[in-house]
């Protein structure tokens, strides 16, 4: 008798050389799209678009004002949402949050382009002992972003 409900697993053919999945299956996600609450949506959209190089794919307004935006860079999407300040204007954003993004692009060129567009690096491109290279930026609200890639040859 087949299982029903959320723990039910679909059967699949056993592909030679490929292990069977655990039962019940573990969670396997494919993307993440962080939604960041920002103090000034227009400043944040400008920073992600003009400094970082994201593409604005959607904007939404409320009462004639920009309330949020979706920005994309490669397969990565960030959602920016204007804070309504219901919890106060002094609420800190970005505390304890670091977003790691990976790329196949040349990090040194990317970092140089960000600086040429007026951006400030929180950390210059650095080789890591585990075989990656990365640099970091901090957005206008304090959200930290580390961009990493396999070491450049």
Image: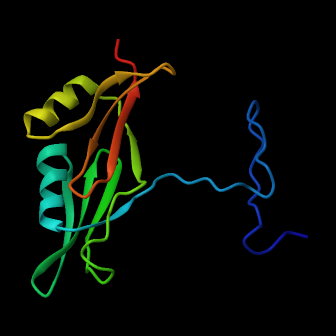
Q: For the view shown, which residue lies furthest in the right direction?
A: 1
Quarter of the picture containing the C terminus is top left
Seen in the picture, residue 124 relative to 1 is either above or below; the reply is above
Asked if residue 143 is positioned above or below residue 130 in the image, the reply reads below
In the displayed structure, does residue 7 sit left or right of residue 152?
right
User: Which residue is nearer to you in this view: 101 or 119?
Assistant: 119
Identify the image quadrant of residue 14: top right
Residue 24 falls in which quadrant of the image? bottom right
Query: In the figure, is residue 32 to the left or right of 14?
Result: left
Q: Quadrant location of residue 89?
A: bottom left
Image quarter of the N terminus: bottom right
Which one is in front, 28 or 42?
42
> Horizontally, is 68 left or right of 16 in the view?
left
Q: Position of residue 45 (x, y in %)?
A: 16, 59
Residue at (34%, 17%) from the top-left corner? 152
- Does residue 128 lie above or below 135 as drawn? above
Residue 148's spot in the image, x, y percent?
A: 38, 32
């Amino acid at each position: 008798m087949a299982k029903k409900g959320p723990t039910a697993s679909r059967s699949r053919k056993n592909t030679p050389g490929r292990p069977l999945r655990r039962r019940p299956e573990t969670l396997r996600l494919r993307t993440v799209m962080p939604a960041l609450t920002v103090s000034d949506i227009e400043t944040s959209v400008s920073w992600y678009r003009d400094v970082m190089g994201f593409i604005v794919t959607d904007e939404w307004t409320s009462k004639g004002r920009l309330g949020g935006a979706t920005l994309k860079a490669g397969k990565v999407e960030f959602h920016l949402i204007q804070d309504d300040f219901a919890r106060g204007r002094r609420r800190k954003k970005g505390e304890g949050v670091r977003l790691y993004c990976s790329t196949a692009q040349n990090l040194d060129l990317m970092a140089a382009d960000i600086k040429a567009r007026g951006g400030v690096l929180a950390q210059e491109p650095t080789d890591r002992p585990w075989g990656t290279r990365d640099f970091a930026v901090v957005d206008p609200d304090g959200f930290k972003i580390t961009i990493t890639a396999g070491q450049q040859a």
